[in-house]
Amino acid sequence: MEGIDRERLLEEFRRYLEALETLPGDAPAEEPAPDLFSLFSELAALRAEVRAESRLFRGAVDDLRLAQGWLKDNQSGMETALERFSAEFANLRRAALRPVLLELLDLYDRLAAGAGALNQYRPVRGWFRVKSRLEDRRFIDSIREGQAMTLRRLEETLARQGVRAIEVTVGMPVDPHRMTVLELDRQPDLPSGIVTAELRKGFLWGDTTLRLSEVRANKP
């Protein structure tokens, strides 16, 4: 009895081991055979996706070109507006600055006249004692020096704004664009229309005339 049971148990164990060797998980899985219909379907879907991406890309490129054109047109318009604004601002600045410069030129005339009077000043002999004349001369010299410094500072201020004096020399013909004749001279040995004296300086502001020079001209 015991021998029969032992043989049966061994047979069952052997069958169990054989069953383990043939389990589906242990055997290598075989790949399914290729399905042409599925392959063509996948290729068709991929081609449709590529076409859609291409259309999106072309649309993006077209939008980019439109944006570039818009930027170019607007940049050109902005540059034109900026140039116009700059020109208008320059005109407004000149219009506002012109009366100020003319006032400074009037101040220049007064300072120049005062400096000229001080340069021509000479103490009168006999009016004061010698000590008084020396103190008077020192006082006049200090005023003359201060007047000259103020005049130089004013000339530098005008120069920074592009204002410069019109060059006028005796003997040159009258320039109607830069000079105005206030007095006439009668010198028969000189031709007509020749400058014989400068009465008041004229000034240029850049390339334009800020104030005409006042001159005396010959008319025999």
Image (spheres, rainbow, N blue to C red):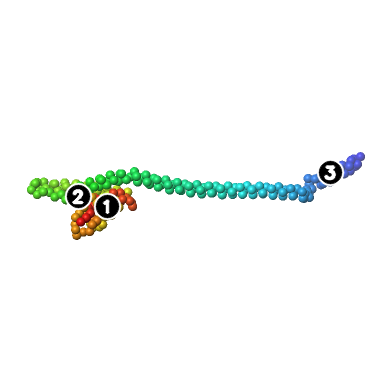
Lower position in the chain sequence, tag 3 or tag 1: 3
Q: Is residue 59 left or right of residue 81?
A: right
For marks 2 and 3, give the CA distance.
Answer: 137 Å
Q: Disc 1 designates what residue?
A: 179
Residue at point 25%, 57% (across, down): 172
> Quadrant where the C terminus lies?
bottom left
- Crowding near the residue tagged with mark 2, few <14, some 14–19, many ≥20 C-alpha atoms within 10 Å: some
Whether residue 164 is visible to the viewer of this picture, yes or no, is no
What residue appears at the point 71 percent right and 47 percent down from the top-left corner? 45
Give yes or no for contact between labels 2 and 3 (Cβ–Cβ under 8 Å): no
For the residues labelled 3 and 1, the Cα–Cα distance comes to 132 Å
Q: Is residue 217 visible?
A: yes
| Mark 1: secondary structure | strand
Which residue is farthest front? 220
Which residue does the image show at 15% across and 49% down from the upper left?
A: 121
Q: Is residue 2 left or right of residue 39?
A: right
x, y percent for residue 117: 18, 48
Image location of residue 37, percent across then percent down: 77, 48
Residue wearing tag 3: 16
Foreground label between 3 and 1: 1
Asked which secondary structure carries label 2, the reply is: helix
Q: Which image quarter is the N terminus in?
A: top right
Q: Residue at 24%, 47% (x, y): give it.
A: 109
Looking at the rendered structure, the kind of residue marked 2 is: Gly
Kind of residue at badge 3: Tyr
Please state the horizontal and vertical placement of residue 65, each as a whole percent of the image.
56, 49
- Callout 3: SS: helix
- Return the residue at label 2: 116
- Mark 2–mark 1 distance (CA, rounded to whole Å): 23 Å
166 or 216, nearer to the observer? 216
